[in-house]
Amino acid sequence: MASEKLREKEKFNMWWQEPVTKLKGIGPKKALEFENINVVTIGDLLNHFPRQGCYLDYSHVKTIDELTTDGSMQLFRGSIVRLNNRRSMRNMKYATITVGDGTGFAEIVLFGAQTYMTRVYHTGDEVFVIGKVGLGRTAKSVTAASLSHVKDEKAEAPGILPTYALSGSLTQNNVRSAVRQALALARKELPECLPAPLLRAKHFLPRLEALENIHFPKSQELLEKARQRFIFEELFFLQCGLLHHRVEIKRDSRGIKMARSGKLVDRVRSQLGFALTDSQKKAWQEIDDDMQSPEPMNRLVQGDVGSGKTALAMLALAKAVENGYQGCLMAPTEILAEQHYQEMQKVLEPAGIRTALLTGGLTAKRRREVLEGLADGSIQAVVGTYALIQDAVVFHSLALAITDEQHRFGVAQRAKLQDKSQYAPHVLIMTATPIPRTLALTVYGDLDVSLMKGMPPGRKPVQTLCYTEEKRAAVYKGLIHQVQEGHQAYVVCPLIEESEGVDARAASDLYDELTHGYLKGIPCGLLHGRLKPEEKDAVMESFARNETKVLITTTVVEVGVNVPNATLMIIEGADRFGLAQMHQLRGRVGRGSAQSYCVLLTSSTNPVTLERLQIMRNCSDGFLLAEKDLELRGAGQFFGLRQHGLSDLYIADILRDTDTLVEARKAAQWAMNDPQIAREVEQAAATTQFDGRFERIFNA
Ligand code: ADP
Ligand code: MG
C-alpha cells in the first residue's frame, strides 16, 4: 500500500525524515490521506502549518453567564447537575447533560452518544465544555459540543487550537495528535538553523519554541512571534541560496576577461544607424565592464518593449568576436530568431562578422553547415531558438550567451552551455517582463540587473481604448479604415488556457468568423503555436511585406515581433489577460511614425473587470502595470516561482512580507560574507531543514 514517495523516504534516518507511519495512529491508509495534503514525513507534518487565522482560541474559560449566543465555539467549565437519556419525537436517541457553575446553567445536547456519555460522566463531575451556545427555555442550550473531564483543580484551558488543511477522512484530531507526537520528538532533538548572532539580534524565538507555538500557541503574542520567525527563516534561506549561487558563478575561474572595446565594437555601433539613448549607454557600460572582468557576467537587462535591447545584444556579440570568441543569441520563437538574424545581417555582417541562424526549420544540409561552422569557429555570432543548446551543437570558443525574452538560463542550461565551451561564458538575459522590485529580489536575487528606462526618440505613445461587446462592429469598421489608409492590424484572440492546442483552435475559429464577417475581402493571416515553422515564417513574411493586412493571432506574437506599418491592435476577450501581458502585446504597435491604437474588447460587464482594463488606458509603464497585476491578481498568478526553479513559499508572502524580505536579504548578505557563518548556513540548509528544499537551492 505504501506509495512510491513513501518507500523512497524510508531510506533516511533523521527522525524528521521518517515517514508519518512511525507515529501512533497512522497506518498505511491514513498515510495516504496525509500524502494528499503533501505530508509524507514527520518533518513535512511539522511544516504543515495551520493557515493564518485558522486557530480556535480556547485560552479563556468563560463562566456560563459570560457565554454569548453569536454562533461561535466557546469554552466554559462547570459541574454536572443532571444527565438524561431521551428520545425525540421522531424517535431519535439523544442525551442531555446539564452543567452549572454558580452563575447559571447550560444544557448540553448530545445526539447518538447517550449510553457512552452516561457511562463516562456522572453527576458532580467537573467538566470543560466547548460548543455553540443558544438560548434555551430554562438554561442556555449548547450544541456541537465536546466535553472533557477537568482532571485536577489546577487544570488549564485547552488553549489555542490549530485547525489544519485536511483531506479525505482525516480529522482535525488526527492531525493534532500526529503533530503533538512530532513535537514530542522535536523536544528531544531539534538543531537550531539560524545563525546565533542573528537569533540574538532579531530577538527571534528559538526554533523549538517557534515550532511549538505555530502549532499549539501558548498565546496570541507567541503565535505572532513564531510566525515572524518562520517567515524570516524562509526568506533568509531563500536569499542565502540565491547569493550562494551568485558567488559560485563569480568564482568560476574559467571566466574570460576581455579587452577594452575597440574598432570592431565601434564599427557595429555606427552600423546601428542611431545614437544610443542614455539608458542604452548606461546598460552597455555595465555589460562592457562585466565582460572585461575575469568573473563571468550574469546580468539581466530589463527594459520595456521597444526600449532597444537588441542593440545591446549586437554590441555584446561584437565584443566577444573582437576578442576572438564566439557569441550566441537565443530567442524563444523562430520568428523572433529570424528577426534578430535580419538585424545581425544588417549590423554585424557589414562590420565583417560571420553570422548564422540555427533553428529547427533549417534544411538538413544547411543545419550541417551551421554546426560545422560553429565547431570550427568560422561562424562567430549565431542566433537561434532553443535548438542552440541541444547536444549536437558544439562551439569552438563560446564566450557569450545571450537570451532574449522569456528564457532564463537555469542552472541546468548554464551547465549545458559550459559543456559546449572550455570557458564559463558570460551570460546576458534580456527581458521586457517587468518584474516588480520586490519580486525581483526573490526571483532574480542571483543576477545583476541593468534597468532601461524610457524609449528611443520619436515614439508616439499607443492610444488605448476599451469597449464592450456591443461596439464590436464599430471597432472592426475602425480596423477597415486603418487598412484603407494603408496600415495593418493585429487581432489577438482570447486567451483560453495555457495550452497551445486549445488556443490554436480558438484562433482558427476567430479567423473563420472574421474572414466571413467583418473582414470579408481583406487579406488576413493566421498565426498560432501549432503551425509548422515554415508556415509561421510564411505568415509572418507575408504580413511584414504588407501583403496580408490583418494578422489574427494568439499570444505567440507577444514577444519581439516588429512590423512598423501595423498601427492597430484589437485584443478580443481582454478581460482574460494580465495587464502586463496586454502591455507586451500592445508593444507590437506604435513602432512606426503613425499614431497607433490598441482596442481592448470585452464582453464582461463586471465593474471590477472594466476598472482593471481602464488602467491600460492611462498607463504605458510596464513596471507600473506589473505592480498593479501583482496587487490585483497576486504573485502566484503573475509569476510562478516554480518556473524559476524556486519552490513555493510555505508561510512567507512576498507581497505582504516585503519588509521582511528586504531584512532577510540584508541578513543573507551579512551571513554569506562571513565564511564561517556561510558554511553554517549551508550546512543547516542541508541537514536541519525538514524538507531539504533549501539544500536544492544551494546545490543548484
Ligand atoms: P526591445 O527592447 O523591445 O527588444 P528593440 O531592440 O526591438 O526593442 O528596439 C525597438 C526599435 O527601436 C527598433 O526598431 C530599433 O531599431 C529602434 N531603436 C533602438 N534603439 C534606438 C535608438 N537609440 N534610437 C532610435 N531607434 C532605436
Ligand atoms: Mg526585443
Image: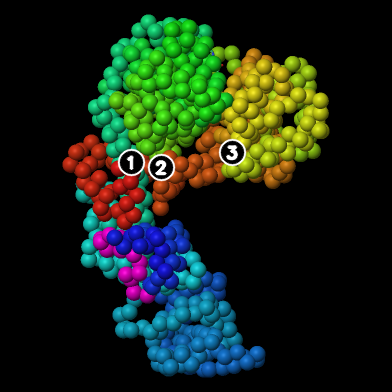
Sequence-wise, the earlier of marks 1 and 3 is: 3
Report whether residue 464 is seen: no
To which residue does mark 3 refer?
A: 578
Q: State the SS at label 3.
A: loop
Please report contact status of discs 2 and 3: CB closer than 8 Å, yes or no: no
Mark 3: few, some, or many residues within 10 Å (few <14, many ≥20)?
Answer: many
Q: Of 614 and 529, which appears nearest the observer?
A: 529
Magenta region includes residue 17: yes
**Dot label at residue 216:** none
Q: Of 652 and 34, which appears nearest the observer?
A: 34
Residue 553 in the image: x percent, y percent?
A: 66, 32
Q: Of 323 and 121, which appears nearest the observer?
A: 323
Please report contact status of discs 2 and 1: CB closer than 8 Å, yes or no: yes
Looking at the picture, does residue 433 appear above or below residue 118? Answer: above
**Dot label at residue 645:** 2
Mark 2: few, some, or many residues within 10 Å (few <14, many ≥20)?
Answer: some
Task: Tell me which amino acid carries mark 2.
Answer: Gly
Q: Residue at x 72, y 44 (%)?
A: 605
> What's the image's color scheme?
rainbow
What range is drawn magenta here? Answer: 12-25
To which residue does mark 1 refer?
A: 700
Q: Residue at x 45, y 20 (%)?
A: 370
Residue 218 in the image: x percent, y percent?
A: 34, 66
Image-based side of 614 in relation to 186, left or right? right
Sequence-wise, the earlier of marks 2 and 3 is: 3
Tell me the CA gap for discs 1 and 3. Answer: 31 Å
Q: Residue furthest left?
A: 676
Image-based side of 560 in relation to 374, left or right? right
